[in-house]
Amino acid sequence: MKLDLQLGDTLQGDCALKELNLMLVFQVNCPGCLSKALPDLNSIVTEYPQINAFAVSTAFEEFGLNNIHNTRLLLEQGALTQASQRYFERLGYKKLPYKISTPVVMDYFVQSEKLSELNNVVLAQIEGELLPPKIRRKFCDVIDQRLLPLARTGRTFLNNDLQGTPSWFIFDNQFEVLDSWFGHKDVQWVRGVIERWMG
């Protein structure tokens, strides 16, 4: 399987592809990503400088929180968003208690002007049909609740059918996926997977 990598702005470091690449896809408002996955990625970057390890900040929900602005604040100031903030405050921290040392890139997102244009085209089509108002409202609800969130979701997340965050991929410089998993795995397990592909 080939990885469909659609990246936007690079926010930190350099993620030039190597023969072996480890990618973590995360959201800033994901406590599991910030408490487990990103610290694990930090240690992997230190232990395996011969591989390209990097993180992709994405959004598939809570688009007002999981965005480039809050990703920058997380990287520069350790600023946390709602769910992540609640998690770390229970541990006695007001901000992220470590520095993210890995390269971080934003997922690619369709521009908001394009989303508005798409919405207007669909609504104009619905208006042009002789539909009863109740049916028209149902169409509008489907657009708002199903189609627009899909259109607003990060392309790497959407195009690779990810289940959620954190999601991990090991792939080569031809974008061939060697291994992938969803959720948290013990860092020792991750090391074993990396070493299997390095050997």
Image (cartoon, rainbow, N blue to C red):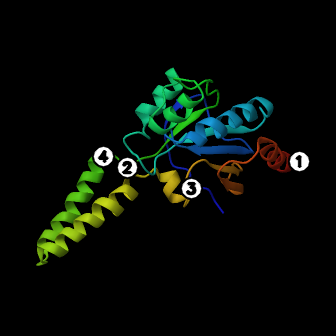
Query: Which numbered disc flags the more N-terminal residue, 3 or 2?
Result: 3
Decide: few, some or many residues near mark 3? Use Cα within 10 Å; few <14, some 14-19, many ≥20: some
Where residue 68 sits, quadrant-wise, is top left
Instruction: Answer whether labels 1 and 4 touch (C-beta < 8 Å).
Output: no
Tell me which amino acid carries mark 2.
Val
- What residue sits 26% from the left and 58% below the top? 118
As shown in the figure, which amino acid type bears the numbered disc 4?
Ser
As helix, strand or loop, the secondary structure at mark 1 comes to loop
Can residue 186 be seen in this snapshot? Answer: yes
The tally of labels here is 4
Residue receiving disc 4: 112
Q: Which mark is residue 127?
A: none
Marks 1 and 3, how far apart at CA? 25 Å
Q: Which residue is mark 3?
A: 4
Q: Kindly identify the amino acid type of the residue bearing the numbered disc 1.
A: Gly
Q: Quadrant of residue 176?
A: bottom right
